Image (cartoon, grey):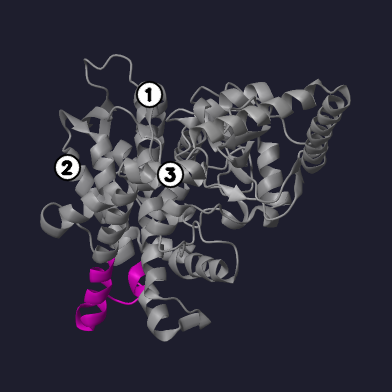
Amino acid sequence: MQNTLSTFLLTQQKQMAETLLNPFAFQALISIILLITITKWLSKSTKSKNSPPSPPRLPILGHLHRLSLLPHHDLQSMARNHGPVMLIHFGSVPTLIASSAAAAAEIMKTHDLAFADRPDSSLFRRLLYDNKDVSVSPYGEYWRQLKSICVVQLLSNKRVQSFHSVRAEETEILIGKIGGKAECVDLSRMFTQLTNDVVCRSAIGRKYGDGGDGERFLSILREFLEVLSTISIGDFVPSLSWIGRFNGLDKRVDRVANEIDEFLESVIRERLDNPAERVVAGENFLDILLDIYRNNSGGVSIDRDSIKAIILDVFAAGTDTTATVLEWAMSELLRRPVILKRLQTEVREVAEDSHNITENDIERMHFLKAVMKETLRLHTPIPLLVPRVAREDVKIMGYDVAKGTMVMTNAWAIGRDPSSWDEPESFNPDRFLNSSVDYKGVDFELIPFGAGRRGCPGTAFAMATNEFVLANLVHRFDWKLPNNCGELDMSERPGVAIRRRVPLVAVAVQC
């Protein structure tokens, strides 16, 4: 058998050598190779047309090797060399990176409908009930119904105002914990607890504190947010999808999804089985959703998985992100005592001697609002926003973008773009005084909550908490950094929201 195989191989090698030595056969072979190469090149050129600039990439990985745990920094650096519209590849997935206000406006305003879809993610599908939430649900009739529920029934201005008592009570608890005895307090931990409690009470009618089910829920929620921010390499390099099984990610995702589902199902079952204990209808998001679920109110039909997915959206978008903004706002104020004093003066003049700051008081605090806008500009909570996908071929800034291309907007880089902002790296709230620029999705140089159809519907809810808590903190206490602090560490750590790498510790003195 071995002799027969060897004879066959020798014969094939001899025939190949004779063919290659034949000048006519050799020329024909070269011509075929050139024809194939030129055809592929022409096909690629015709397809890509006027593609956006793109850095050199590696086979299989594309540009993944150029990204760190803080990709908004890496993409900003790459954009400086390749322009505000740049095409990179996350493995096999072509991705358009927008890093200027003009590019963002074309994507979220001029061609908003063309980019109204979300990329498919196996991780999101498993964690968010097969994409039944409003954030990553595919564009279509189901998504429009969910968006209507959120905008009209859950997160309208009237509904946000109705939660003022929740914000006031939880802020008063925060004030009590701080104490004001000139001792160091961990504001990062306190802000996380506060936002969790506000969102819990608003979303499901009760909060979960220390011990028992409360501690279990907070632990599950923390892990859910961690897993949600994880990249599944198989979504970008399908041939490496086995890594999720090898490193335990797949098992962890399934476990977290099951634990979250068990908890939410128990909350829903308890509310449905004990109507006598149910809080007043409309007092929290869960009751509103259950009314729609049982009565098909407003002509909208949703199932239990939809309810759970929406509630998860509220937790994912309303806890870490709100705490993040408060954390960075206080960090910047503590680094700049003059700005902090200015803000305190305004708040105390408007509130006078009252401990009870009202919504009307907040509306009169113009420097407070400028401080919040400057914080959002310099420290965008979700720097790359939630990605979109091109639903059709479209032109952006003169470049051709193919259908199916993923689109990421670097809102963090836009907030620091020198073509839009003077001295963009400095914290200067004055830039927003006597300025019409706002964060509500109309001014594309400041889009921390996105814009267009897929803009965040919870903007008013989040900012009501941020403004109210910050106003009370500077109203009730004088603040300073610990004596041994030195220069405040402003480095970031990765996550769903980009928070401080080092917890914020400060000293509060009762006024």
Q: What residue would you read off at disc 1?
A: 490
Question: For mark 3, does the 10 Å Cα neighbourhood hold few (<14), some (14 to 19), or many (20 or more) residues?
Answer: many
Cβ–Cβ under 8 Å for marks 3 and 2? no
User: Residue 353's x, y, as percent?
Assistant: 29, 44
Q: Is residue 490 above or below residue 324?
A: above
Q: Residue at 32% of width from left, 62% of height from top?
A: 202
Tell which tag, 3 or 2, sits nearer the viewer.
3
Q: Residue at 67% of width from left, 33% of height from top?
A: 86
Q: What residue would you read off at disc 2?
A: 177
In-front residue for pair 447/467 = 447
Q: What's the residue type where badge 1 is placed?
A: Met
Q: Which mark is residue 232?
A: 3
Residue 148 visible? The answer is yes
Q: Residue at 32% of width from left, 36% of height from top?
A: 474
User: Residue 115's x, y, as percent?
Assistant: 65, 52
Boundaries of the magenta span? 264-288
Q: Earlier in the sequence, mark 3 or mark 1?
A: 3
In-front residue for pair 365/271 = 271
- Look at the image and say whether residue 386 sits in the magenta stretch: no
User: Residue 225's x, y, as percent?
Assistant: 34, 47
Q: Earlier in the sequence, mark 3 or mark 2?
A: 2
Q: What's the residue type where badge 2 is placed?
A: Lys
As drawn, is 197 to the left or to the right of 209? Answer: right
- Tag 1, which secondary structure? loop
